[in-house]
């Protein structure tokens, strides 16, 4: 066994960011700008989680489809750039963690617009030679198409429009191996289990999104099961929460509650929760990334 995985303990150096200078980081105006930003940022800054969280990941742009899922302070960056559907305070620590691993190949199941895929690929390429990266989704994305057409210089990326529940996906994954797979597609228990079983044999690391989420009990359940049988130092959680998200009080707004969380074809549909579940929701926050290593 190699060194234990430790989450959220990356060094904090002084970032040379506009955030530190007290300025507001401006979102990128194009995919090309986001790519250029990651390619030109000094490695020292790329290893600094605070810089990633408060500058680079904001500039690269966040998703805005379910704005209520994001804290208000991040709204200015939602709907811009590559539209990553990740909380910067979690994604930053996750990326810094990845920078310490020797990852030569990456698979993302459920890439949506492609934001997280593009950032992860460009970020990993700054630390080692990435030989292969594959994004899978049932829906096509213009952002992904733009990135692949103009910025996949080494032609290492592949983009597959397919369901991970398909025979084609299972056969594809069985014929390949990926050092890291991020499972962020079908968030039901069966869906996550399907994806996990497909990649489990060949993956060195598997990351799950929404390991802390009342909206995705299937992911929470699988993550708890994995943690139950894996040695603790093989597992890392990136589950920092924004105060605004935990304080939001999902129970107080029926609109937020039903539109923001549950009326999503890709997320687990649930019936209205009981009062004690609403209380738990307020305390549990949202999203969260978990990574497990297989030796
Ligand atoms: C939450 S979004 C992914 C967000 C993206 N990983 C990010 O961080 O920006 C979930 C995506 O999974 C896709 N999806 C759902 N079920 C899927 C399946 N069985 N196979 C492939 N994609 C799936 C949806 O179309 C959707 O785009």
Image (cartoon, grey):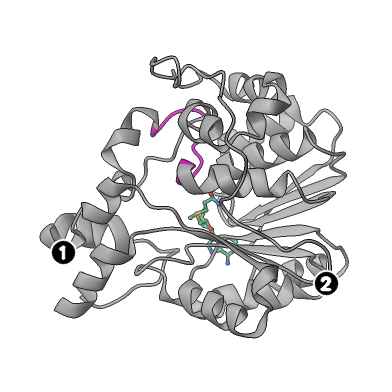
The answer to whether 214 is drawn above or below residue 128 in the figure is below
Q: Which residue appears farthest toward the left when viewing the image?
A: 252
1 or 2: tag closer to the N-terminus: 1
Q: Residue at x 44, y 19 (%)?
A: 25
Q: Position of residue 158 (x, y in %)?
A: 77, 46
Please state which of residues 246 and 65 is positioned toward the viewer in this rendering.
246
The answer to whether 192 is drawn above or below residue 149 in the figure is below
Q: Magenta part of the protein: which range?
A: 78-88
Quadrant field for ligand 1: bottom right
Q: Check disc 1 and report its element: helix, strand or loop.
A: helix
Write down the residue under mark 1: 251
Q: Position of residue 166 (x, y in %)?
A: 67, 71
Q: Is mark 1 within 8 Å of ligand 1?
A: no
Q: Is 263 on the left or on the right of 204, as rendered?
A: left
Instruction: Name the quadrant of the C terminus.
Output: bottom right
Q: Position of residue 189 (x, y in %)?
A: 51, 79
Q: Is 247 on the left or on the right of 173, as rendered?
A: left
Q: For residue 222, what is the image quadrant?
A: bottom right
Residue 295 is marked as 2
């Amino acid at each position: 066994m190699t060194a234990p995985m430790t989450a959220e303990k990356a060094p904090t150096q002084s970032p040379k960011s506009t955030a530190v200078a007290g300025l507001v980081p401006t979102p990128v105006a194009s995919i090309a700008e986001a790519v250029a930003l990651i390619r030109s940022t000094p490695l020292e800054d790329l290893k600094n989680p605070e810089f990633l969280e408060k500058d680079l990941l904001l500039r690269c742009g966040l998703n805005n489809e379910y704005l209520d899922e994001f804290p208000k302070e991040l709204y200015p960056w939602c709907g811009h750039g590559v539209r990553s559907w990740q909380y910067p305070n979690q994604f930053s620590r996750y990326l810094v963690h990845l920078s310490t691993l020797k990852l030569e190949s990456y698979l993302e199941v459920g890439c949506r617009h492609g934001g997280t895929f593009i950032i992860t690929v460009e970020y990993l390429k700054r630390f080692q030679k990435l030989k292969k990266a594959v994004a899978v989704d049932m829906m096509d994305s213009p952002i992904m198409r733009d990135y692949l057409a103009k910025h996949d210089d080494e032609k290492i990326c592949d983009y597959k429009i397919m369901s991970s529940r398909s025979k084609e996906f299972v056969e594809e994954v069985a014929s390949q191996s990926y050092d890291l797979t991020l499972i962020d597609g079908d968030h039901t228990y069966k869906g996550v289990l399907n994806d996990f079983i497909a990649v489990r044999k060949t993956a060195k690391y598997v990351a799950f999104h929404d390991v802390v989420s009342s909206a995705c009990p299937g992911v929470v359940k699988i993550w708890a099961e994995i943690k139950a049988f894996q040695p603790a130092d093989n597992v890392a959680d990136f589950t920092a929460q924004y105060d605004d998200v935990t304080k939001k009080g999902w129970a107080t707004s029926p609109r937020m509650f039903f539109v923001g969380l549950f009326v999503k074809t890709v997320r687990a549909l649930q019936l209205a929760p009981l009062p004690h579940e609403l209380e738990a929701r307020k305390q549990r926050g949202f999203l969260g990334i978990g990574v497990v290593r297989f030796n």
